[in-house]
Image (cartoon, rainbow, N blue to C red):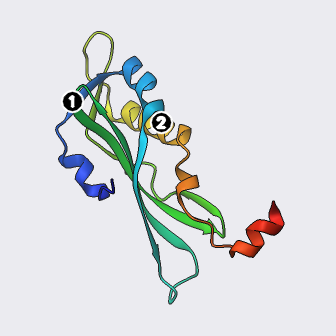
Amino acid sequence: MSVPAWQVINWTPVKLELLDFQRTFSSFKHLGTTIHADAEQSDLRSGQAVWGMEHDGRWIGVAFEWAEMTNHIVALSDPMQVLSNITLVAADGARVDDGQRIVQLNTAIHELDWQEQIPSRRPLWAERLAA
């Protein structure tokens, strides 16, 4: 499944208690990664990534933009701009504020192996030499 990043915010909003979210995100699967390269501007690549899963019959997910800082080193382009259809609530049902929500979403992304989904630019022979 390859999902455009912007679609995540169009999925049905899902409320998750903070502890449930923290347990759930380890089950997120890679749903798609786009890669763009602008040879006129630089050799560095950028793109978007989407991760998610089906939860109680509905899809939940996160999407974010990434950029290559140097060859083989990628990072979130803007950690404050993570798209998600997840609304986090505390154990008492109170909505988690936006600042805490973005921290939780970034923590989840940090736990995922999203960088591994971006193919190396090294030629196959270089991969073999490194092994």
Asked if residue 43 is positioned above or below residue 32 in the image, the reply reads: below
Q: Which mark is residue 108?
A: 2
Q: Residue at x 33, y 53 (%)?
A: 1
Circle 1 or circle 2, nearest the eye: 1
Report the amino acid beneath label 1.
Gly
- Where does residue 14 sit, x and y in percent of width and height? 22, 30
Rendering quarter of residue 74: bottom right
Near-viewer residue (33 or 95)? 33
Q: Residue at x 54, y 61 (%)?
A: 118
Near-viewer residue (89 or 111)? 111
Near-viewer residue (41 or 28)? 28
- Where does residue 43 sit, x and y in percent of width and height? 58, 81
Taking the view exactly as shown, the residue that stands out farthest to the bottom is 40
Instruction: Evaluate whether residue 120 shows in this view.
Output: yes
Is disc 1 surrounded by few (<14), some (14 to 19) or many (20+) residues within 10 Å? Answer: few
Report the amino acid beneath label 2.
Ala
Residues at marks 1 and 2 touching, judged by CB atoms closer than 8 Å: no
Say how many tags the image has: 2
Q: Which mark is residue 57?
A: 1
Asked if residue 32 is positioned above or below residue 99 in the image, the reply reads: below
- Where does residue 52 sit, x and y in percent of width and height? 36, 41
